């Protein structure tokens, strides 16, 4: 048998459908479909990861901005509280020493947001503070 005849026999043998070869072809098709599904799922998960990573970064920026704003508001509130406390303390000293003009200066320095509470406190305090002619027992 010549070499060319042998190649023809092999090609002829490979082209014949055999029962075991038909099952093998089905398995190859199933493998190809599974690989295609895996490739699509991998691409989809990569897309979702990039999408959520961008969203997460955006939300991180928002939370950072809000945290800075909250910290600034806390600092401002604490500064106003200290200012009002110091102003009221100085007003009290001036009132206790009978320096009405100085007390009026401190009264005018009270911040507008604190003014209603201060006025209500002054009304209450004046009704329970001892008069100058009264002496506290020791």
Image (cartoon, rainbow, N blue to C red):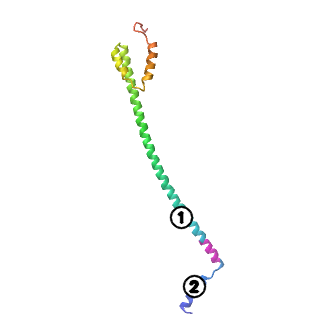
Point out which mark residue 119 bears. Answer: none
Residue 107 colored in magenta in the image:
no
* Distance Cα–Cα, label 2 vs label 1: 34 Å
Span shown in magenta: 20-28
At 42% from the left edge and 34% from the top edge, which residue is drawn? 74
State the image coordinates of residue 73 (x, y, percent, origin top left).
Answer: 42, 34
Q: Is residue 104 shown left or right of residue 23?
A: left
Per the picture, the main secondary structure of the magenta-coloured stretch is helix
Determine which quarter of the picture holds residue 27.
bottom right
Mark 1 lies on residue: 39
At 46% from the left edge and 52% from the top edge, which residue is drawn? 54
State the image coordinates of residue 16 (x, y, percent, origin top left).
Answer: 62, 82
Question: Residue 28 versus residue 65: which sits nearer the camera?
Answer: 65
Q: In the current view of this chain or complex, which residue is farthest to the right?
A: 19
At 41% from the left edge and 30% from the top edge, which residue is drawn? 78
Residues under numbered marks 2 and 1 in contact, where contact means CB atoms less than 8 Å apart: no
At 54% from the left edge and 63% from the top edge, which residue is drawn? 40
- Quadrant, the C terminus: top left
Determine which quarter of the picture holds residue 8.
bottom right
Q: In the current view of this chain or complex, which residue is farthest to the top?
A: 133
SS type, badge 2: helix
Using the image, determine if residue 30 lies above or below residue 87. Answer: below
State the image coordinates of residue 7 (x, y, percent, origin top left).
Answer: 55, 87
SS type, badge 1: helix
Point out which mark residue 11 bears. Answer: 2
Using the image, determine if residue 22 lies above or below residue 35. Answer: below
State the image coordinates of residue 83 (x, y, percent, origin top left).
Answer: 38, 26
Q: Dot 2, crowdedness within 10 Å: few (<14), some or many (≥20)?
A: few
């Amino acid at each position: 048998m010549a070499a060319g005849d042998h190649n023809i026999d092999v090609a002829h043998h490979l082209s014949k459908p055999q029962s075991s070869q038909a099952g093998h072809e089905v398995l190859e098709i199933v493998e190809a479909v599974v690989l295609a599904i895996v490739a699509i799922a991998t691409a989809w998960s990569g897309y979702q990861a990039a999408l959520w990573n961008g969203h997460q970064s955006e939300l991180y920026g928002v939370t950072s901005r809000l945290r800075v704003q909250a910290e600034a508001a806390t600092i401002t509130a604490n500064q106003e509280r200290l200012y009002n406390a110091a102003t009221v303390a100085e007003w009290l000293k001036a009132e206790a020493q009978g320096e009405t003009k100085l007390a009026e200066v401190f009264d005018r320095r009270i911040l507008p947001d604190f003014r209603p509470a201060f006025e209500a406190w002054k009304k209450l305090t004046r009704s329970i503070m001892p008069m100058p002619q009264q002496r506290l027992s020791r």
